[in-house]
Image (cartoon, rainbow, N blue to C red):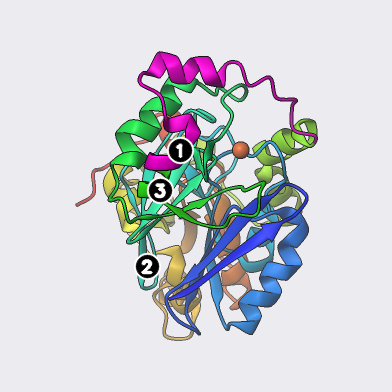
Amino acid sequence: MIFRQMFDNVSSTYTYLLASRHGGEALLIDPVIEHTGRYLKLLEELDLRLVKVIDTHVHADHVSAMGKLRDATRCVTVMGEQSPADVVSMRVRDNEKLSIEGLTLTALHTPGHTSESYSFLMDDRVFTGDTLLIRGTGRTDFQNGDPYDQYHSLFERLLKLPEHTFVYPGHDYKGDTVSTIGEERAFNPRLNVSSADEYAEIMNNLNLPNPKMMDVAVPENLQIGLRLEAQHRVPSTEVEELLEMWPDVQVQMVDIREEGERRRDGAIPGSIHLPYRRFGAHCSEAGTLRNLSRNASLLIYCAVGERSTLAVEIANEHGLSNIAHMPGGFRAWKAAGGAVETVG
Ligand SMILES: [Fe+2]
């Protein structure tokens, strides 16, 4: 396995790079916008293809590199389903699996630092974001933070993991890089409490100043989709337009979400499934999409319209032209009352 821990010394943030092999797919956790070039260079040096980027939560102390990395690599952006960010390609639920080639992470909803904070467990290690830090825990005094939620996330979820599980936090201000669940259970002073009330008492009296970047970082991190619409202009057909014609739509609808998302949320009746992961191959000379596009106009949809935008760009680069996407994706379709069929 390829594993890198990278540090941003302005916000003391750790960013993690994971991949199963050279030449394969890679994933980044909590990238910082100022280091986008550094990540892209490292990916190239290690011969890796970035396919997913995760933010554990909406960060208040740095601007996420998710949007920039998506624009540069067409990777899939991932956050928990509770995230208030406008456009995140894929939203995971508690206990849901998230995969890239050769690696699988389990999403754990661990609210408290913020209401949408997630941790990600992978075999012998857990990426705890700002929920569990080394000999500390993330503050709970803004962005819907709640010390009682955090107490539950820590004591009922993270501390119940096997004690040898490595803890890789989202930050460290002292220079520590890794700990274990057993170590934190024994030596983390914040966890040396006998009740949720006692924990809340500590957390409610930290009196920390707001992060310097907060007023810039939070709004920026909530609108990673804005740049998507400005920078990637591709043909589209709005949900309303489709619903007016339904069921006589004169297009073949193509669902490019992952199988897990389809099973979880359902799909648009009559659509075919061609996952985004292999979209370039679908567009190639012998590819399914190229064959389909000979006989019909294609309408691509995903969860929220991010992957579908990038997919139309890829298709255009392969010379396919009668192809558009559905802005807002399956979320907008469902919200407008569009028909849904169960999958699997
Ligand atoms: Fe945070």
The answer for how far apart the CA atoms under marks 1 and 2 are is 27 Å
The stretch of residues the image draws in magenta is 185-212
Q: Is residue 136 left or right of residue 252?
A: right
Q: Quadrant of residue 57?
A: top right
The answer for how far apart the CA atoms under marks 3 and 1 are is 42 Å
Disc number placed over residue 103 in the picture, else none: 2
Residue marked by disc 1: 331
Disc 3 crowd rating (10 Å Cα; few below 14, some 14-19, many 20+) is some
Disc with the residue nearer the chain's start (3 vs 1): 3
Q: Residue furthest left?
A: 344
Q: Position of residue 124 (x, y in %)?
A: 34, 61
Front-lying residue, 249 or 137: 137
The answer for how far apart the CA atoms under marks 2 and 3 are is 26 Å
Residue marked by disc 3: 183
Q: Nearer the viewer, mark 3 or mark 1?
A: 3
Front-lying residue, 203 or 20: 203
- Look at the picture and state if 101 lies above or below 110: below
Quadrant hosting ligand 1? top right
Q: Quadrant of the N terminus?
A: bottom left
* Amino acid, disc 1: Arg
* Amino acid, disc 2: Leu
Disc number placed over residue 307 in the picture, else none: none
Q: Is mark 2 within 8 Å of ligand 1?
A: no
Label 3 secondary element: helix
Q: Quadrant of residue 335?
A: top left
Front-lying residue, 237 or 186: 186
